[in-house]
Image (cartoon, rainbow, N blue to C red):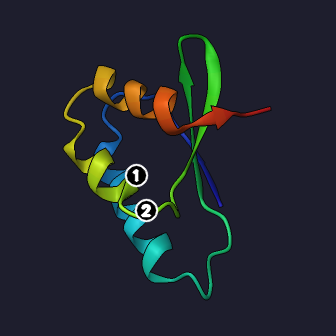
Amino acid sequence: MVEKRRVGGTSAKWSALARYAQDHTESVRRCMAVAVVAGSLKALDLTTPDIDHRIAEATNQNLIAAIFDGEGMSYP
């Protein structure tokens, strides 16, 4: 599953999706959030433990972008 969105206004949705992916590891092998950050596509693995909490606490676009920069990976 890949969720691609613009960075702003997505923390609640990505947080819920991350919780779902973490709670259903027997059904979800891979769950990535993909966003454009500083002109590049970045992917964030939503199955990473506690990523749902970090995303939920990100209250603005800059904080979400910082999570993608710090924990994300380049996405083709």
Q: Say above or below: 31 vs 41.
A: below
Q: Quadrant of the N terminus?
A: bottom right
Q: Secondary structure at mark 2?
A: helix
Q: Badges 2 and 1: C-beta atoms under 8 Å apart?
A: yes
Q: Position of residue 13 (x, y in %)?
A: 35, 53
* Residue that appears at 68% across and 73% down: 29
| Residue type (three-letter) at the residue carrying disc 1 | Trp
Would you place residue 60 above or below residue 26 in this image?
above
Q: Which quarter of the figure has residue 65? A: top left
Residue at image position (43%, 64%) is 49
Q: Quick check: 36 above or below 67?
A: above
Q: Position of residue 26 (x, y in %)?
A: 61, 88
The disc at residue 14 is 1
Q: Is residue 25 left or right of residue 10?
A: right
Give me the residue at 80% from left, 32% from top. 76
- Indicate the position of residue 69 as horizontal and vertical percent values: 50, 26
Mark 2 Cα shell of 10 Å, populated few (<14), some (14-19), many (≥20): many
Q: Tell me the number on the disc at residue 51.
A: none
The three-letter amino acid code for the residue at tag 2 is Ala
Q: In the figure, is residue 31 to the left or right of 64?
A: right
